[in-house]
Image (cartoon, rainbow, N blue to C red):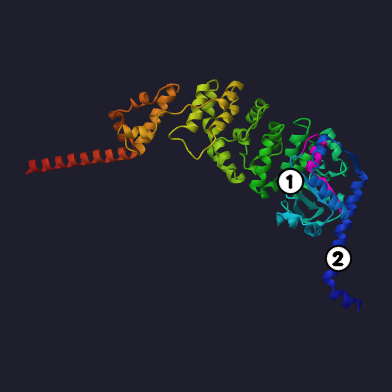
Amino acid sequence: MWRELFLSNRFFVTKQLLQCLKYSFIARNIQTTSASKRKITMKLDSEEFRSLFTPELKKLNDLFIANKFQLRMAGGAVRDLLMGLKPADIDFASDATPSQMKELFNREGIRMLNKNGEEHGTITCRIDDKENFEITTLRIDVVCDGRRAKVEFTTDWQLDANRRDLTINSLFLELDGTVIDYFGGIEDLRTRRVAFVGDATQRIQEDYLRILRYFRFFGRIAKSGDAHEQSTLDAIISNKEGLMNISGERIWSELKKICVGRFGGDVLTTMVSRCGLASLLGLPKDCDVTTCREIFTYNSDRSLEPMTVLSALFKNQQDIDVFHKRCKLSNAEKSLAEFIVEKRDEARSNIDSMKYFKDLILDCEKAPSRDKKKINGRDMVREIAKYVCASAEIIEEIGVWRMPEFPVSGKDLIGTGVKMGPIMRRLLAHLFDLWKKSEYKADRDELLSHITAELVQVNDVDHPKKRGKKRRSEDSDKELEVKRGDDTEDKATV
């Protein structure tokens, strides 16, 4: 009888057995962790914390308490508050499941948004049509493929903290100001230490993007640019190939913040020189970060675009194309990299000439032959000035210089008898160069006085299509002369 009962329910029994084994493994981990790390609490009562308490948040918290659910701030918001910063975004965690939250919000007539997050345990609600709150159910990672995890919900706060990447991101904050710390995040923040929760290798293998998250938060938290723990770098080096399976969009989202973050030059050096991550990120394998460090150091008191720093690693257009293919840059980002790589040698040679940078701005913004798809020309010129380490005065003046208007248009040329088309574009470009050489003083009449019949004819003949026609005409004349010569010889023979 027992044998028949087992066989008829073997799938259910097997599933339950596997569940028991899984949770016993998690329990053993908790016991080990608890032996080395105990739960720590502290009270927070800062101005930044109090400023978060809107009537909508109080209403949400009261609603959860009334229904015997817990609601806490989680992760980065708690970290920022402990650092004396007001968080830009707040993530909430709760022991209520998504279905329980939905039932609660429906009963109270509270609108819910963005239901795509429900599969991962996240519900977004809007209180009194004034403020949105994103609340995620406590969860554990069941299956990890190095990119995304399949999760199961739990009511255990420590299990949820255990699945987070860094100790400083594993903190919770009750709305009465109690900070809850299971893995030493408070102390790590105090000593400016950046460390993975538990075993670094395991945390990285759950999501290889955590390699870049480590470097990003290192730049924000660490007390110096080289304060890495060797064991952490060893775990990163051993698992770096996993980055190949991470999408370019996710890579770039982290990398761009690293480039312009605190200690950006030092962090890039560690990533490229010590950990060998360059080719995995789409960067040249043998790139030299020396110029990156110089750019970052020189502009320490200025904002930088990520591509201004990274362009120092590109030797040519091919390097940019490879990086773009890997990281899916925006048009503006790719244009800036191309602009810097094309103009940097010329800019270095004219580093002290404000006239050069003014001309460059006008070439980007006003030139008749400019690429109108490329925008923010002034911004690009300012970035290349930072790249070549131009003087502070030049960098500042680039931002405030008032551009003069080029006084000649296509209509003006039509009035002189020039036809629309390639000839007009070439003549406008010629006049634009004359205007720049006059230091933008030549007016419309003076510039138009340079348009002569001879100049129009030269530009007409010099056009590629005209040159082709002229060449064909000359070839035909030569053939005709040869033919006439042959006829003369034939007559002489007769």
What residue sits right under mark 1 in the picture? 239
The answer to whether residue 55 shows anywhere in this view is yes
Question: Along the horizontal axis of the image, is 281 left or right of 342?
Answer: right
Front residue of 438 and 226? 438
* Residue farthest right in this picture: 35
* Residue 5 horizontal/vertical position (percent): 88, 76
Residue at 84%, 67% in the rendered image: 14
* Residue 45 horizontal/vertical position (percent): 86, 37
Q: CA distance from mark 1 to mark 2?
A: 33 Å
In the image, which residues are magenta?
A: 69-86
Count of marks overlaid on the render:
2
The answer to which image quadrant residue 16 occupies is: bottom right
Question: Along the horizontal axis of the image, is 422 left or right of 301?
Answer: left
| Position above or below: 197 against 139 | above
SS at badge 1: helix
Question: Along the horizontal axis of the image, is 330 left or right of 160?
Answer: left
Q: Residues within 10 Å of mark 2 (few under 14, many from 20)?
A: few
* Residue farthest bottom in this picture: 1
* Residue 70 in magenta stretch: yes
Front residue of 388 and 483? 388
Are the two marked residues, 1 and 2, in contact with CB atoms closer than 8 angstroms?
no
Marking on residue 309? none
What residue sits right under mark 2 in the picture? 16
Q: Where does the C terminus fall, quadrant-wise? A: top left
Disc 1 marks a residue whose amino acid type is Asn
